[in-house]
Amino acid sequence: DAGVTQSPTHLIKTRGQHVTLRCSPISGHKSVSWYQQVLGQGPQFIFQYYEKEERGRGNFPDRFSARQFPNYSSELNVNALLLGDSALYLCASSHWATGKMNTEAFFGQGTRLTVV
Amino acid sequence: TQLLEQSPQFLSIQEGENLTVYCNSSSVFSSLQWYRQEPGEGPVLLVTVVTGGEVKKLKRLTFQFGDARKDSSLHITAAQPGDTGLYLCAGGGFQKLVFGTGTRLLVSP
């Protein structure tokens, strides 16, 4: 079975540009979470989506947005890129339902974004 | 805001040595997870600890959850070069994980 897949794997953008990152969860997983990992630090939570609805948001500016599609894949969008947005962006999927036992989150290999 | 501090930040040892990595917080966590991340890859779950005082073993790795569920440790016995990587503790639920600052381990032959 395919794991969590993210695209592209690497991306170089210029300050002020917009970027879209994509994530396909493991088949059967309906929850997708996004994380930003700056070099030398642990990942930071950005968003969680479940059944196409936002279920959680971390401490990130409004330049960051996301959405989830009917097939449970997800996009992370970042507008007006800053140099400080350079990071590894990780997507994680899990089988999760409100009020039920949560299962392990599986991570993709990430998208390395460099803003110049 | 829940924060997780890890120590040490970086550890360079020789093959066969033992080591311990610490994960501390001022907040109580219902569970803590430990992940290992290799360059160019996403974190991979090693273990979840749930009960205060719990000890779990995974081959040469021993994980402990503090009695008050505010801290955890990872002990590696007889480290091998294959143990090299970034070790992350995390808590707060699988969908909205709060990650620690990370410990980068380098094991030389």
Image (tube, rainbow, N blue to C red):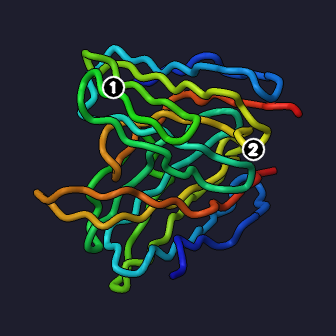
Indicate whether A78 appears above or below B73.
Answer: below
- Label 2 chain ID: B
Question: How far is mark 2 from mark 1, CA to CA?
Answer: 34 Å
Q: Residue at x 43, y 17 (%)?
A: B24
Q: Which residue is mark 1?
A: B1
Indicate whether A109 appears above or below A74.
Answer: above
The amino acid type found where label 2 is placed reads Gly
Image quadrant assignment for residue A108: bottom right
Q: In this rendering, which labeled residue sits more in front, label 2 or label 1?
A: 2
* Nearer to the camera, A7 or B87: B87
Q: Residue at x 63, y 27 (%)?
A: B77
* Residue B82: mark in rendering: 2
Indicate whether B42 appears above or below A50.
Answer: above
Mark 1: which secondary structure? loop
How many residues crowd mark 1 within 10 Å: few (<14), some (14–19), many (20+)?
few
- Residue B19 shown left or right of residue B96 in the figure: right
Mark closest to the chain's N terminus, 2 or 1: 1
* Nearer to the camera, A93 or A61: A93
Q: Position of residue A83 (x, y in %)?
A: 72, 43
- Residue B24 shown left or right of residue B96 in the figure: right
The amino acid type found where label 1 is placed reads Thr
